[in-house]
Image (cartoon, rainbow, N blue to C red):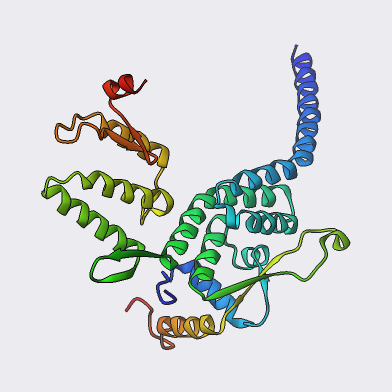
Amino acid sequence: MANNIRLSGPTLRLLKLMIEKPLQGRSGAEISKTLNIGSGTLYPLLQRLENAGWLKSEWEQLDPSEAGRPRRRYYKLTGEGQKLAVQALAELQTAPGVLAWQ
Amino acid sequence: MAMITDLLAAVGAAAAAFFGHLVAHDFTEIAPSIARALILSATRKLPKKIRQRYSEEWLADLNDRRGVLAKLGHSFGCVLCARRMRTQSIRAGLSKKKFRFQIGGVGIIELDFPTALFFVGLATHWMKSRNSSRPVKMARIAYGLAKHAFIFRNLGPIDFGKTARLVGMLGRIPDKKNPQFKAWVDGRQILPEKQKDTGA
């Protein structure tokens, strides 16, 4: 199940972003803004990775009435997700100076 | 004459600018409400178990977007992806679900959904080839399974209303061997007109 993920362009960009700081949770809005990916693409992608066990999500520890805003949902890579993401990105990494389509 | 035309054009432009400003102002005021309503309507397409979660998450993300266009863009994105997320959610649930079958001499076996459906189809075909009345019962089981869990890989979830109508249409084809079984719609046996009359 965990390996059964289609590694599209947005998926790779998302994995790359998540692997930069694996312990830091990121909300959908933050990811969308950073990667410039629309909500229509982002949320199904997050859901797919979460179902496959690459990502986990949790609610922000916050009282919405005190903060005056709704709590966010933060996404993080799981341990297995980190390994698989590193592996997936390494496979696609080309040696310096070599054209990717050669 | 030219002066009057210029004057009218200037007045027209001023009026258009004034009303345009009013419309834009009103639109800016109501845009967050529109975005919110769009998100709530999008979450209604999701399965119940994840509806509350995504409703809260998308509204929180809407709150983090700055500007009318960003808010509307986010909400339209949610509307567009809701159906796909529903499909993914059902598919994920199915991949984890096991169906248990009791088979004489073998015991209880657990099968995943595609395998279970394949065996039900195979059994239906086998019984049909033996001219047994059981295919109807098997078809009912298969339809029951499908009703709760069936999903096509690329076509998204079946519209069960349409499926029921389709089963109803097929049921109108006379079955000489088993006239009592006309059709099964939503697990309910639809009897031929004659039997209905006798029953009443």
Which quadrant, please, contains the C terminus of chain B? top left
The residue under the point 38% across, 41% down is: B187
Asked if residue B104 shows in the view, the reply is yes
Residue B94 location, x and y as percent? 42, 62
Residue B109 location, x and y as percent? 32, 70
The residue under the point 32% across, 79% down is: A102
- Image mark count: 0
Choose top left, top right, bottom left or bottom right for residue A36.
bottom right
The residue under the point 54% across, 83% down is: A82
Tell me: B128 left or right of B58.
Answer: left
Which quadrant, please, contains the N terminus of chain B? top right
Question: Residue B200 versus residue B75: which sits nearer the camera?
Answer: B200
* Residue closest to the far front: B199
Residue B120 location, x and y as percent? 26, 56
* Residue closest to the far top: B1
Question: Residue B67 versus residue B77: which sits nearer the camera?
Answer: B77
Asked if residue A10 is positioned above or below residue B31 in the image, the reply reads below
Asked if residue B124 is positioned above or below residue B14 in the image, the reply reads below
Asked if residue B155 shows in the view, the reply is no
The residue under the point 47% across, 59% down is: B88
Tell me: A98 left or right of B75.
Answer: left
